[in-house]
Protein backbone atom coordinates (compact mmCIF):
# COMPACT_ATOMS: atom_id res chain seq x y z
CA UNK A 1 0.00 0.00 0.00
CA UNK A 2 2.94 2.31 0.73
CA UNK A 3 4.15 2.06 -2.87
CA UNK A 4 0.79 3.27 -4.20
CA UNK A 5 0.64 6.22 -1.82
CA UNK A 6 4.22 7.25 -2.59
CA UNK A 7 3.73 6.76 -6.31
CA UNK A 8 3.49 10.24 -7.86
CA UNK A 9 0.10 10.43 -9.58
CA UNK A 10 -1.92 12.46 -12.04
CA UNK A 11 -5.69 12.78 -11.50
CA UNK A 12 -7.60 13.85 -14.59
CA UNK A 13 -11.20 12.90 -13.85
CA UNK A 14 -12.50 14.29 -10.56
CA UNK A 15 -15.89 15.96 -10.13
CA UNK A 16 -15.64 18.50 -7.31
CA UNK A 17 -18.89 17.68 -5.52
CA UNK A 18 -18.38 13.96 -5.93
CA UNK A 19 -14.93 14.23 -4.36
CA UNK A 20 -16.03 15.56 -0.95
CA UNK A 21 -14.59 13.36 1.80
CA UNK A 22 -16.33 12.02 4.91
CA UNK A 23 -14.55 14.59 7.09
CA UNK A 24 -15.62 17.53 4.94
CA UNK A 25 -19.13 16.15 4.68
CA UNK A 26 -19.26 16.10 8.48
CA UNK A 27 -18.49 19.83 8.53
CA UNK A 28 -21.15 20.55 5.89
CA UNK A 29 -23.79 18.51 7.72
CA UNK A 30 -23.01 20.45 10.94
CA UNK A 31 -23.42 23.73 9.07
CA UNK A 32 -26.87 22.73 7.83
CA UNK A 33 -28.53 20.51 10.48
CA UNK A 34 -32.02 21.52 9.33
CA UNK A 35 -31.55 19.53 6.09
CA UNK A 36 -31.47 16.26 8.09
CA UNK A 37 -28.88 14.75 5.78
CA UNK A 38 -26.94 11.69 6.92
CA UNK A 39 -23.71 10.23 5.62
CA UNK A 40 -25.52 7.24 4.14
CA UNK A 41 -27.17 9.65 1.69
CA UNK A 42 -23.92 11.09 0.38
CA UNK A 43 -21.63 8.10 -0.07
CA UNK A 44 -21.68 4.51 -1.30
CA UNK A 45 -19.67 2.37 1.12
CA UNK A 46 -17.56 -0.75 0.73
CA UNK A 47 -19.32 -3.60 -1.03
CA UNK A 48 -22.39 -1.46 -1.79
CA UNK A 49 -23.77 -0.99 -5.28
CA UNK A 50 -26.19 1.56 -6.69
CA UNK A 51 -27.81 2.04 -10.05
CA UNK A 52 -26.52 4.99 -12.04
CA UNK A 53 -29.86 6.72 -11.39
CA UNK A 54 -29.36 6.38 -7.65
CA UNK A 55 -25.86 7.83 -8.01
CA UNK A 56 -27.32 10.92 -9.59
CA UNK A 57 -29.73 11.24 -6.64
CA UNK A 58 -26.68 11.31 -4.36
CA UNK A 59 -25.32 14.34 -6.23
CA UNK A 60 -28.61 16.17 -5.65
CA UNK A 61 -28.24 15.66 -1.90
CA UNK A 62 -24.64 16.90 -1.94
CA UNK A 63 -25.66 19.96 -3.94
CA UNK A 64 -28.06 20.92 -1.11
CA UNK A 65 -25.13 20.85 1.29
CA UNK A 66 -22.82 22.85 -0.97
CA UNK A 67 -24.71 25.98 -1.92
CA UNK A 68 -22.71 29.01 -0.77
CA UNK A 69 -19.38 30.52 -1.79
CA UNK A 70 -18.10 29.61 1.65
CA UNK A 71 -19.06 25.94 1.14
CA UNK A 72 -17.42 25.80 -2.27
CA UNK A 73 -14.22 27.34 -0.97
CA UNK A 74 -14.03 24.83 1.88
CA UNK A 75 -14.94 21.86 -0.28
CA UNK A 76 -12.46 22.75 -3.01
CA UNK A 77 -9.54 23.48 -0.68
CA UNK A 78 -10.21 20.28 1.30
CA UNK A 79 -10.42 18.19 -1.89
CA UNK A 80 -7.16 19.62 -3.24
CA UNK A 81 -5.35 19.03 0.09
CA UNK A 82 -6.62 15.45 0.18
CA UNK A 83 -5.43 14.69 -3.33
CA UNK A 84 -2.04 16.22 -2.46
CA UNK A 85 -1.83 14.06 0.68
CA UNK A 86 -2.54 11.02 -1.48
CA UNK A 87 0.50 11.72 -3.66
CA UNK A 88 -1.29 13.43 -6.55
CA UNK A 89 1.13 15.90 -8.13
CA UNK A 90 -1.19 17.21 -10.84
CA UNK A 91 -4.97 17.45 -10.55
CA UNK A 92 -7.66 18.54 -12.97
CA UNK A 93 -10.82 19.31 -11.05
CA UNK A 94 -14.10 19.68 -12.88
CA UNK A 95 -17.35 21.15 -11.68
CA UNK A 96 -20.71 22.35 -12.99
CA UNK A 97 -21.25 26.06 -12.26
CA UNK A 98 -24.45 26.40 -10.28
CA UNK A 99 -26.68 29.32 -9.47
CA UNK A 100 -28.47 29.34 -6.10
CA UNK A 101 -30.98 32.19 -5.70
CA UNK A 102 -31.30 31.77 -1.89
CA UNK A 103 -27.61 32.28 -1.23
CA UNK A 104 -26.97 34.65 -4.15
CA UNK A 105 -24.49 32.23 -5.62
CA UNK A 106 -24.02 32.87 -9.33
CA UNK A 107 -22.32 30.72 -11.94
CA UNK A 108 -19.68 33.44 -12.19
CA UNK A 109 -18.97 33.48 -8.44
CA UNK A 110 -19.04 29.67 -8.41
CA UNK A 111 -16.13 29.45 -10.82
CA UNK A 112 -14.38 32.41 -9.18
CA UNK A 113 -14.51 30.64 -5.83
CA UNK A 114 -13.15 27.38 -7.24
CA UNK A 115 -10.25 29.33 -8.74
CA UNK A 116 -9.70 31.12 -5.42
CA UNK A 117 -9.39 27.71 -3.75
CA UNK A 118 -6.77 26.63 -6.29
CA UNK A 119 -4.79 29.83 -5.73
CA UNK A 120 -5.08 29.50 -1.96
CA UNK A 121 -3.68 25.96 -2.06
CA UNK A 122 -0.86 27.13 -4.31
CA UNK A 123 0.09 29.79 -1.78
CA UNK A 124 0.13 27.19 1.00
CA UNK A 125 2.99 25.58 -0.89
CA UNK A 126 1.29 22.21 -1.44
CA UNK A 127 3.19 19.95 -3.83
CA UNK A 128 0.37 19.80 -6.37
CA UNK A 129 -0.54 21.73 -9.51
CA UNK A 130 -4.26 22.14 -10.12
CA UNK A 131 -6.25 23.10 -13.19
CA UNK A 132 -9.99 23.51 -13.66
CA UNK A 133 -12.48 22.24 -16.22
CA UNK A 134 -15.88 23.91 -16.44
CA UNK A 135 -18.55 21.23 -16.70
CA UNK A 136 -21.59 21.19 -18.94
CA UNK A 137 -24.48 19.20 -17.51
CA UNK A 138 -25.95 17.51 -20.59
CA UNK A 139 -29.52 17.60 -19.31
CA UNK A 140 -29.61 21.40 -19.48
CA UNK A 141 -29.50 21.59 -23.27
CA UNK A 142 -28.14 23.86 -25.98
CA UNK A 143 -28.48 27.29 -24.49
CA UNK A 144 -26.98 26.56 -21.09
CA UNK A 145 -24.14 24.66 -22.78
CA UNK A 146 -23.37 27.73 -24.87
CA UNK A 147 -23.45 30.02 -21.81
CA UNK A 148 -21.15 27.63 -19.97
CA UNK A 149 -18.63 27.73 -22.80
CA UNK A 150 -18.71 31.55 -22.76
CA UNK A 151 -18.10 31.53 -19.03
CA UNK A 152 -15.22 29.08 -19.44
CA UNK A 153 -13.70 31.21 -22.19
CA UNK A 154 -13.81 34.32 -19.99
CA UNK A 155 -12.13 32.48 -17.16
CA UNK A 156 -9.59 30.85 -19.42
CA UNK A 157 -8.45 34.35 -20.33
CA UNK A 158 -8.66 35.88 -16.84
CA UNK A 159 -7.46 33.03 -14.60
CA UNK A 160 -3.84 32.99 -15.72
CA UNK A 161 -4.18 29.59 -17.34
CA UNK A 162 -5.98 27.81 -14.49
CA UNK A 163 -9.14 27.13 -16.51
CA UNK A 164 -8.05 24.83 -19.30
CA UNK A 165 -11.11 23.08 -20.65
CA UNK A 166 -14.66 21.83 -20.74
CA UNK A 167 -16.17 18.66 -19.37
CA UNK A 168 -19.39 17.14 -20.66
CA UNK A 169 -21.12 15.11 -17.95
CA UNK A 170 -24.43 14.59 -16.19
CA UNK A 171 -26.99 11.81 -16.47
CA UNK A 172 -26.12 9.95 -19.69
CA UNK A 173 -29.69 8.78 -20.15
CA UNK A 174 -30.93 12.35 -20.52
CA UNK A 175 -30.47 14.67 -23.51
CA UNK A 176 -28.46 14.09 -26.68
CA UNK A 177 -25.00 15.22 -27.70
CA UNK A 178 -26.22 16.54 -31.05
CA UNK A 179 -27.81 19.51 -29.25
CA UNK A 180 -24.51 20.29 -27.56
CA UNK A 181 -22.29 20.03 -30.60
CA UNK A 182 -22.29 23.77 -31.47
CA UNK A 183 -21.22 24.68 -27.93
CA UNK A 184 -18.48 22.04 -27.94
CA UNK A 185 -17.23 23.22 -31.33
CA UNK A 186 -17.12 26.78 -30.07
CA UNK A 187 -15.15 25.68 -27.03
CA UNK A 188 -12.64 23.87 -29.19
CA UNK A 189 -12.27 26.83 -31.50
CA UNK A 190 -11.42 29.20 -28.69
CA UNK A 191 -8.69 26.94 -27.32
CA UNK A 192 -10.50 25.11 -24.53
CA UNK A 193 -9.68 21.41 -24.29
CA UNK A 194 -12.53 18.91 -24.31
CA UNK A 195 -13.03 15.96 -22.00
CA UNK A 196 -16.32 14.26 -22.81
CA UNK A 197 -18.14 11.46 -21.00
CA UNK A 198 -18.79 9.04 -23.87
CA UNK A 199 -20.70 5.73 -24.02
CA UNK A 200 -21.14 5.47 -20.28
CA UNK A 201 -24.34 3.51 -20.94
CA UNK A 202 -25.05 1.16 -23.90
CA UNK A 203 -27.54 3.39 -25.71
CA UNK A 204 -25.09 6.11 -26.72
CA UNK A 205 -23.35 4.66 -29.77
CA UNK A 206 -24.75 7.10 -32.33
CA UNK A 207 -23.99 10.03 -30.03
CA UNK A 208 -20.43 8.80 -29.42
CA UNK A 209 -19.86 8.45 -33.16
CA UNK A 210 -20.99 12.04 -33.66
CA UNK A 211 -18.97 13.52 -30.79
CA UNK A 212 -15.84 11.62 -31.79
CA UNK A 213 -15.79 13.71 -34.96
CA UNK A 214 -14.87 16.81 -32.96
CA UNK A 215 -12.57 15.03 -31.86
CA UNK A 216 -12.46 15.41 -28.06
CA UNK A 217 -9.07 15.67 -26.34
CA UNK A 218 -9.97 13.00 -23.79
CA UNK A 219 -12.79 10.55 -23.15
CA UNK A 220 -14.43 9.89 -19.78
CA UNK A 221 -15.31 6.21 -19.20
CA UNK A 222 -16.04 5.07 -22.79
CA UNK A 223 -17.39 1.88 -21.22
CA UNK A 224 -19.47 0.71 -24.18
CA UNK A 225 -17.26 1.82 -27.08
CA UNK A 226 -15.56 -1.46 -27.87
CA UNK A 227 -17.18 -4.43 -29.65
CA UNK A 228 -17.05 -6.79 -26.64
CA UNK A 229 -19.35 -4.38 -24.81
CA UNK A 230 -21.76 -3.88 -27.71
CA UNK A 231 -19.81 -1.01 -29.26
CA UNK A 232 -18.02 -1.30 -32.59
CA UNK A 233 -14.61 -1.59 -34.21
CA UNK A 234 -15.47 1.60 -36.09
CA UNK A 235 -15.67 3.55 -32.81
CA UNK A 236 -12.50 1.97 -31.48
CA UNK A 237 -10.70 2.86 -34.70
CA UNK A 238 -11.77 6.49 -34.37
CA UNK A 239 -10.46 6.66 -30.81
CA UNK A 240 -7.19 4.96 -31.74
CA UNK A 241 -6.64 6.95 -34.92
CA UNK A 242 -7.02 10.23 -33.07
CA UNK A 243 -5.04 8.86 -30.12
CA UNK A 244 -7.66 10.09 -27.62
CA UNK A 245 -6.75 9.10 -24.05
CA UNK A 246 -9.38 7.43 -21.87
CA UNK A 247 -10.05 8.36 -18.26
CA UNK A 248 -10.92 5.10 -16.50
CA UNK A 249 -12.58 4.93 -13.09
CA UNK A 250 -12.79 1.34 -11.83
CA UNK A 251 -14.61 1.66 -8.53
CA UNK A 252 -17.05 4.23 -9.87
CA UNK A 253 -18.09 1.94 -12.71
CA UNK A 254 -18.40 -1.12 -10.48
CA UNK A 255 -20.34 0.69 -7.73
CA UNK A 256 -22.50 2.44 -10.32
CA UNK A 257 -23.09 -0.96 -11.93
CA UNK A 258 -22.24 -0.06 -15.52
CA UNK A 259 -19.47 -2.68 -15.24
CA UNK A 260 -20.29 -6.03 -13.56
CA UNK A 261 -16.95 -6.56 -11.76
CA UNK A 262 -13.41 -5.20 -11.53
CA UNK A 263 -12.00 -8.00 -13.68
CA UNK A 264 -14.51 -7.21 -16.43
CA UNK A 265 -13.59 -3.53 -16.50
CA UNK A 266 -12.73 -2.19 -19.96
CA UNK A 267 -9.32 -1.08 -18.64
CA UNK A 268 -8.20 -4.53 -19.74
CA UNK A 269 -9.27 -4.00 -23.35
CA UNK A 270 -7.65 -0.58 -23.81
CA UNK A 271 -4.53 -1.40 -21.82
CA UNK A 272 -3.90 -4.50 -23.95
CA UNK A 273 -4.26 -2.34 -27.05
CA UNK A 274 -1.51 -0.12 -25.67
CA UNK A 275 -3.90 2.81 -25.87
CA UNK A 276 -3.34 5.73 -23.43
CA UNK A 277 -5.48 4.84 -20.41
CA UNK A 278 -5.44 6.98 -17.28
CA UNK A 279 -6.61 5.63 -13.92
CA UNK A 280 -8.87 8.16 -12.19
CA UNK A 281 -11.28 8.36 -9.23
CA UNK A 282 -14.35 10.12 -10.73
CA UNK A 283 -15.96 10.83 -7.33
CA UNK A 284 -13.65 9.80 -4.49
CA UNK A 285 -16.14 10.93 -1.83
CA UNK A 286 -19.27 9.31 -3.21
CA UNK A 287 -17.48 6.08 -4.10
CA UNK A 288 -15.27 6.05 -0.96
CA UNK A 289 -11.94 5.64 -2.68
CA UNK A 290 -8.76 7.53 -3.51
CA UNK A 291 -6.33 7.45 -6.40
CA UNK A 292 -3.77 5.23 -4.60
CA UNK A 293 -6.47 2.68 -4.02
CA UNK A 294 -7.58 2.80 -7.67
CA UNK A 295 -4.01 2.16 -8.85
CA UNK A 296 -3.71 -0.69 -6.38
CA UNK A 297 -7.00 -2.19 -7.57
CA UNK A 298 -5.90 -1.95 -11.20
CA UNK A 299 -2.61 -3.62 -10.31
CA UNK A 300 -4.16 -6.51 -8.37
CA UNK A 301 -7.00 -7.05 -10.86
CA UNK A 302 -4.89 -6.97 -14.00
CA UNK A 303 -1.71 -8.36 -12.51
CA UNK A 304 0.51 -5.32 -13.02
CA UNK A 305 3.91 -5.15 -11.35
CA UNK A 306 5.34 -1.98 -9.82
CA UNK A 307 7.20 -1.08 -13.01
CA UNK A 308 4.05 -1.31 -15.10
CA UNK A 309 2.17 0.79 -12.54
CA UNK A 310 4.94 3.37 -12.55
CA UNK A 311 4.74 3.57 -16.33
CA UNK A 312 0.98 3.97 -16.15
CA UNK A 313 1.22 6.97 -13.82
CA UNK A 314 4.08 8.45 -15.84
CA UNK A 315 2.22 8.15 -19.15
CA UNK A 316 -0.70 10.07 -17.69
CA UNK A 317 1.49 13.19 -17.80
CA UNK A 318 1.20 13.23 -21.59
CA UNK A 319 -2.58 13.44 -21.28
CA UNK A 320 -2.85 16.58 -19.12
CA UNK A 321 -4.46 19.76 -20.45
CA UNK A 322 -1.98 22.18 -18.88
CA UNK A 323 0.81 23.88 -20.80
CA UNK A 324 3.90 22.08 -22.15
CA UNK A 325 6.23 23.65 -19.58
CA UNK A 326 4.30 22.07 -16.72
CA UNK A 327 4.36 18.71 -18.50
CA UNK A 328 8.14 18.94 -18.60
CA UNK A 329 8.31 19.87 -14.92
CA UNK A 330 6.15 16.88 -14.01
CA UNK A 331 8.28 14.52 -16.08
CA UNK A 332 11.31 15.78 -14.23
CA UNK A 333 9.58 15.29 -10.88
CA UNK A 334 8.82 11.66 -11.81
CA UNK A 335 12.43 11.09 -12.81
CA UNK A 336 13.66 12.49 -9.51
CA UNK A 337 11.25 10.38 -7.46
CA UNK A 338 11.78 7.12 -9.37
CA UNK A 339 14.85 5.81 -7.48
CA UNK A 340 13.25 6.24 -4.03
CA UNK A 341 9.74 5.03 -4.94
CA UNK A 342 10.28 2.23 -7.44
P1 LIG B 1 -20.17 18.92 -9.62
O1 LIG B 1 -20.17 19.19 -11.09
O2 LIG B 1 -21.42 19.43 -8.95
O3 LIG B 1 -18.93 19.42 -8.93
O4 LIG B 1 -20.10 17.34 -9.42
C1 LIG B 1 -21.24 16.49 -9.48
C2 LIG B 1 -21.75 16.38 -10.90
O5 LIG B 1 -20.78 15.74 -11.72
C3 LIG B 1 -23.00 15.52 -11.06
O6 LIG B 1 -24.18 16.25 -10.82
C4 LIG B 1 -22.88 15.05 -12.52
O7 LIG B 1 -23.35 16.04 -13.40
C5 LIG B 1 -21.39 14.92 -12.71
N1 LIG B 1 -20.93 13.53 -12.48
C6 LIG B 1 -20.30 13.04 -11.40
N2 LIG B 1 -20.01 11.74 -11.56
C7 LIG B 1 -20.48 11.39 -12.76
C8 LIG B 1 -20.47 10.17 -13.49
O8 LIG B 1 -19.99 9.09 -13.05
N3 LIG B 1 -21.05 10.20 -14.73
C9 LIG B 1 -21.58 11.35 -15.24
N4 LIG B 1 -22.11 11.29 -16.47
N5 LIG B 1 -21.60 12.49 -14.59
C10 LIG B 1 -21.06 12.53 -13.34
Image: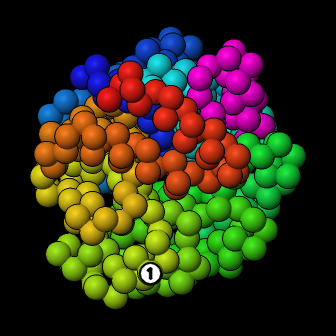
Task: Tell me the colour scheme of the image.
Answer: rainbow
Q: Is residue 274 left or right of residue 131?
A: left
Q: Residue reaching furthest front? A: 339
Q: Which residues are magenta?
A: 111-139
Q: Determine whether 221 is above or below 2 in the image.
A: below
Query: Is residue 117 within the magenta segment?
Result: yes
Q: Determine whether 52 is above or below 305 in the image.
A: below
The C terminus lies in quadrant? top left
Q: Position of residue 315 (x, y in %)?
A: 44, 51
Look at the numbered disc 1 and give the secondary structure of its residue. Answer: helix
Q: Which residue is mark 1?
A: 241
Q: Is residue 193 left or right of residue 270?
A: right
Q: Is residue 287 left or right of residue 114?
A: left
Q: Is residue 340 left or right of residue 48?
A: right
Q: Residue at x 78, y 68 (%)?
A: 190
Q: Is residue 65 visible?
A: no
In the foreground, 334 or 8: 334
Amino acid sequence: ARFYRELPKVELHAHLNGSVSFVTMEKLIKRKPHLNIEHSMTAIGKGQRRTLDECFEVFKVIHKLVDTEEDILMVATDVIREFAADGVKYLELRSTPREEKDTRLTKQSYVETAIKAIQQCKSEGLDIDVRFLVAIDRRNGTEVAMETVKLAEEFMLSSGGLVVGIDLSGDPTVGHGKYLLPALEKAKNCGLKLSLHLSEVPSQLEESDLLLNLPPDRIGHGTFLHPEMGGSQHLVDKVVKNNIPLELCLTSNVKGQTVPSYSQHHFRYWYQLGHPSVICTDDKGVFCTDLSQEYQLAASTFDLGHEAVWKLSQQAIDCIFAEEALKEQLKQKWNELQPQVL
